[in-house]
Amino acid sequence: MSIKLRLTVMNFLQFFVWGAWLISLGGYMIVTLGFTGGEVGSVYATMGIASLFMPGLLGIVADRWLNAEKVYGLCHVIGAGLLLWATTVKDFKTLYLIMLLNAMVYMPTIALGNTVSYKVLEQKGLDVITHFPPIRVWGTVGFIAAMWMVDLAGWTKSPLQLYISAASALFLGLYAFTMPACPPTATSTGKRSMVSALGLDAFVLLKRGQTAVFFIYAMLLGAALQITNAFGGAFLDDFKVKFPGTFGVLHPNLLLSISQISETLFILSIPFFLRRFGIKTVMLISIFAWVFRFGLFAVGDPGAGLWMLVLSMIIYGMAFDFFNISGSLYVDRESDSSIRASAQGLFMIMTNGLGAFIGGTASGWVVDHYTVGGIKDWRSIWLAFAAYALILGVTFPFMFKYKHPAGEALPAHGHH
């Protein structure tokens, strides 16, 4: 097998493991296990907690002591065991603990998988910028493939989705041990301190007013990320009485997977939008895309309103990618080369860590607030989320005064 094919398999499985349960577990917990919105939200918030410190800690281990591919493999093998345990659990407290531990070993593998890919490509003398994106795209394909498999097999409300995830995680963990060795770089300059690996030396960026504003918005937008993952499946399931037998009710994952497909397409459009409109406007487009994402969920349904749900899924790609990628570019431009890796770490911590934790927890409260006698008022729930995004969108241009002229490529020179 060529090395590019081997890395493609690794990236495919990396996200297959996650896609098997990420979108459907919320429906399983609400419909099958009878959890409350708050409980479901807090299970999803475990990924936020884990993202705060685990990627940094395991990054240090791979930087200093243990080969990156071994750390990566171990994480997936441990994750497989935890997911198998999760299939047997019916109560919230135990499941919460298992999913927290699983997030602690899974979330770091996203960065570790990239590290292994970069190192292996460099060892083989291949240009990372040219060869990595087409390999990474297969990660998204893996995510979608897992969602479709779980849906078409009829497992979206069953613990079988966790078995699929566990089996693929075990296979990936063992497969990782066969990858070319990626030893720690034991040079005096290459040793990153605890401080930098946890993104802490990038905190100097928060002293700058504009950058601090950016990170606060990154955190508040990060809160929107997991909401539809956590509650999309349960939302579609609640239409089963009014719209029985409709596509959205029978195949919630297939409908929700349009979001992931849209993501791959919008990634390709980003260079065009950045050149045309500049970073700040692209971020603003992303925030308003969230307003439409939630607003269309509030008014759509799997019957005559199916087109609104589909449109919402398509818009998700824009909402998700435009902020993540333009935000990452902004962080790169604003940080000195010495703290670049830490600055990206801080951006991840704000969106996928603090943001996801706040979003998971708060969205659970919102869902419970609009649940009366076990019936969820989904329209009010989605409108509440849309209003939240609207407030961010209206305040952002006034708070964030950043000039990046449109038409200009993305130069890496000084601060504006």
Image: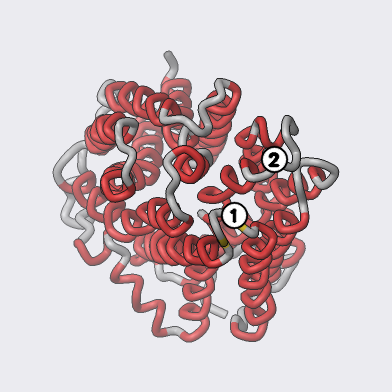
What is the spatial separation of the Cα atoms under label 2 and label 1, in whole angstroms? Answer: 12 Å
Q: What is the quadrant of the C terminus in the image?
A: bottom right
Q: What is the quadrant of the N terminus in the image?
A: top left
Within the image, what quadrant is residue 75 found in?
A: top left
- Identify residue for label 1: 375
Task: Indicate the amino acid at tag 2.
Answer: Val
Question: Residue reaching furthest right?
Answer: 304
Residue found 17% across the figure and 48% down from its top: 64
Residue found 65% across the figure and 85% down from its top: 398
Task: Indicate the amino acid at tag 1.
Answer: Ile
Disc 2 on helix, strand or loop? loop
The crowding category of the residue bearing disc 1, from other C-alpha atoms within 10 Å (few below 14, some 14 to 19, many at least 20), is few
Q: Is residue 356 left or right of residue 246?
A: left
Count of all numbered marks drawn on residues in the image: 2
Q: Is residue 240 left or right of residue 354?
A: right
Residue found 14% across the figure and 44% down from its top: 65
The crowding category of the residue bearing disc 2, from other C-alpha atoms within 10 Å (few below 14, some 14 to 19, many at least 20), is few
Relative to the observer, which residue lies in front, 308 or 195? 308
Residue found 34% across the figure and 66% down from its top: 338
- Identify residue for label 2: 241
Compare marks 2 and 1 and give the one earlier in the sequence. Answer: 2
